Amino acid sequence: MADHVQGLAQLEILCKQLYETTDTAVRHQAEKALVEFTNSPDCLSKCQLLLERGSSSYSQLLAATCLSKLVSRTSNPLPLEQRIDIRNYVLNYLATRPKLAAFVTQALIQLYARITKLGWFDCQKDDYVFRNVIADVTRFLQDSVEHCIIGVTILSQLTNEINQADTTHPLTKHRKIASSFRDSSLFDIFTLSCNLLKQASGKNLNLNDESQHGLLMQLLKLSYNCLNYDFIGTSTDESSDDLCTVQIPTSWRSAFLDSSTLQLFFNLYHSIPPSLSPLVLSCLVQIASVRRSLFNNAERAKFLSHLVDGVKRILANPQCLPDPNNYHEFCRLLARLKSNYQLGELVKVENYPEVIRLIANFTVTSLQHWEFAPNSVHYLLSLWQRLAASVPYVKATEPHLLETYTPEVTKAYITSRLESVHVILRDGLEDPLDDAGLVQQQLDQLSTIGRCEYEKTCALLVQLFDQAAQTYQELLQSTNSSAVDITVQEGRLTWLVYIIGAVIGGRVSFASTDEQDAMDGELVCRVLQLMNLTDSRLAQAGNERLELAMLSFFEQFRKIYIGDQVQKSSKLYRRLSEVLGLNDETMVLSVFIGKIITNLNSGCKRRAGFKYILDLYVSSLTSCLCTYSSVRKLVKLSAVQFMLNNHTSEHFSFLGVNNQSNLSDMRCRTTFYTALGRLLMVDLGEDEDQFEQFMLPLTAAFEAVAQMLSTNTFNEQEAKRTLVGLVRDLRGIAFAFNAKTSFMMLFDWIYPAYMPILQRAIELWYHDPACTTPVLKLMAELVHNRSQRLQFDVSSPNGILLFRETSKMITTYGNRILTLGEVPKDQVYGVKLKGVSVCFAMLKAVLSGNYVNFGVFRLYGDDALDNALQTFIKLLLSIPHSDLLDYPKLSQSFYSLLEVLTQDHMNFIASLEPHVVMYILSSISEGLTALDTMVCTGCCSSLDHIVTYLFKQLSRSTKKRPTPMATDDRFLHIMQQHPEMIQQMLSTVLNIIIFEDCRNQWSMSRPLLGLILLNEKYFADLRNSIVNSQPPEKQQAMHLCFENLMEGIERNLLTKNRDRFTQNLSVFRREVNDSMKNSTYGVNSNDMMS
């Protein structure tokens, strides 16, 4: 007994050290000791002692947390009786100690919820022992306010717990529990919460009293959790779909047909303090989002009428709306009015004219106060966007009045953004223009709103633009104008250019008229005239935000007015012709390209902030080449011909060697040369002279690097910068040249003349990833047989020579990078794993390119293939298993390479040492459960090749055949020495197919047949184990499923037999799921793995 007391005292000390000490070392030691305690065999009994006798809240928290871990574990779960005892103990503990510390109460309620969820299908004497949740909390609800709060919190936490999937249990099990809870208990809990809210609202609660305030808050949370439940298993990501429909079950109809439910929450909103009303509005948002099909037309009209009346009442009494949380939730509620109901239904509501006026006034006021709750504006704009988009389709005779109020909203948005510029600059506030995502989202919404009553929008924009542009021009011409005034005008013009681009992008071809196209022309003329003015200032003091706005405008204009589908007689082009002399889209394209060239020319001469714009302008150049017709038009332009003939640092400063910038800043050069390469290919054909002319600047750069590397003393930084820029340029060209003729010109240019320079760079700077990664990526691109561009003549040895160079580079880099030793964890990807990943991708590309006959290497004693493969093994063994799956790019390159090796080079895999084979098999085993479907599918394919190889070797060894090779014997011997590896993978694959959400069932089925045939006895034991784990009444059905799985399957791996097995497996999976749907069997995904 004394030992127990002493142990408890020690645990209490450790808890205080963990939660209270400021000494990191002491906290770490306490944490380590407590982890050991949670894993100790007597943890359960000590937790009970801590709860009974512990003197501090921290020890009670530790006990509750440890018990939650114990009941949640999937391996060696607690017996049913023990879990029932813990559940009952927790309820009694909470009932007898209602005034525990809040975090202890929360932890104990979490424990109750976890036990209840995981035991939902557990039976004792034909009774579902964990389902009597309302009975469990009834005694709490009939006691004091503190007990009531605990009871309501239990229901709220349980609803939340069952609604959330956890990663330790299969998704299918979660959905079965969630569906059963929804059907058996959720409506009763929601009804209970509404009844309790009605009682509370009728009692005139004293909300200044902390406990009564807390009770009402928990009741509202419970109601919200019920309404926010994932009723049909679709809401996997709450953040992605805010305007979703709440899929209320039909059995809940009565609650929503009764207007008192809706009225209850609106009444609560007006009667409780602002601290609680956001929860009420959250409930109203969910109620407003119930699926349309829950009602017939008359019922829906009545429900909508009550909803709109409630909204009108809030707008008429806006005292609580200045609270940011209330304001945000109310904006969400307004957005749901249109996301769930049609404009034709809204206009028929009795008070619609008054409500739309109030909503418009509220929106205008909100937009004018742009600094207040900016994240809520999205919902208001969403409402008006949906209303405006519905105007052409509304058939109701009642007036919608949007022609009156939409222009007011448009004007409020535009003028408020312009007015904000001065305030932001004056007060040093955060500029919304810096949040590109938010601006783009709002502009997308405004593009639809602004096209409604477009004449008014256009007139406003023209007026505001002319004022701002005139003031800007006067300031530039004045000798005593201040920089602040110029910046303010540039900010106003930035917003106007963005907005003009947005409203042009909102043009819908079937709904637009010639007059509207002429208006677009007026706006475009003004932006292009402004562009001429700003270009003259680029060299001295360009404005980054204004340049980005121009870019956004170009993109919107290109999408709408440039392309084969645009009518050449468009009024827009007529207006452009009259004002600027631009007669057609080719001339406008010429202006755009000229602008891009101007920016590319001047971008690097100024501050580093323009690097981002430089990248975007290069990307914009590429986006102009999105269609074949665009490329044909562009290549004829004098501006494009200028680029093709003058791509040097003299004309494009970012192509020069800038010692002030980082090597990584040159990434845009690859995109730039991809664009140039695509333009060059249009008329290149077989013209080698034109190609040589184009490559002259790159030839000069290569010669310069070769000259530097040939001397013992050279400027290393300059050499690196020149080389990195050069290989990035070449990679862009190689990516663009996807036809055989053009790619062969590039190949003949670079090989053999310049390949030694790349090899030398790897030797010298292997430790500098900023230098080696671009070189490795260039090589990976050169060996990639994209679009079958690598096709050598039958008399050409180039395929073999190219592989030799690849092998040499992989071997050089691999052997040297391994000499670095231990690399810090936070640097390991950048310094080592990124380069290794590119090497894996390079090797995969060359092995699967179908332009090298790898048999000749061994035949003629060439060790290039062996060197590359052995380097791959060395690199692989230097990487921990965890890293293979932690870094997505490394995972994909490794597993795709492994797939090629097991398919075409299985003899090499079979010749490896046992520890290497086990490492590869372990990596496949772990990859089978990866979240990345590509990785999982690659593992299935690799496993299929290995299993097929093993099966063939075993089949041959049982027949009278010539003696197999020693490597075959060794591989078979390794597999016979370690049968558990293949058996574990059989368990894993079968487990995923039966119990989990298998997204690649076909891929999983391919290796499964081979695994079964290699492990028939183990498969039989596994099958019996699964069948016996079912309830008695389900065992016969499960046994029949397994019988049908193997019906008609022969003992071979021929294609016909595999296809039959795949078909059987689809039926098997469906039947097993049907069998288990109503089963009381608590699926434990690790039972099979033990």
Image (spheres, rainbow, N blue to C red):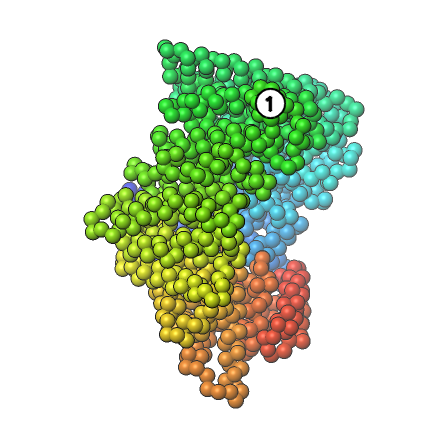
Amino acid under disc 1: Ser
What residue is drawn where x is 29% and y is 50%? Answer: 706
Quarter of the figure with residue 218 = top right
Q: SS class of the residue under badge 1?
A: helix
- Residue of label 1: 577
Q: In the current view of this chain or complex, which residue is farthest to the bottom? A: 960
Quarter of the figure with residue 1050 = bottom right
What x and y, as percent, mark residue 999? 58, 57
How many residues crowd mark 1 within 10 Å: few (<14), some (14–19), many (20+)? Answer: some
Query: Is residue 438 in view?
Result: no
In terms of depth relative to the viewer, which is nearer, 693 or 159? 693
Residue 813 sits above or below residue 373 on the image = below
Q: How many marks?
A: 1
What residue is drawn where x is 78% and y is 27%? Answer: 396
What residue is drawn where x is 59% and y is 66%? Answer: 1005
Query: Is residue 477 in view?
Result: yes
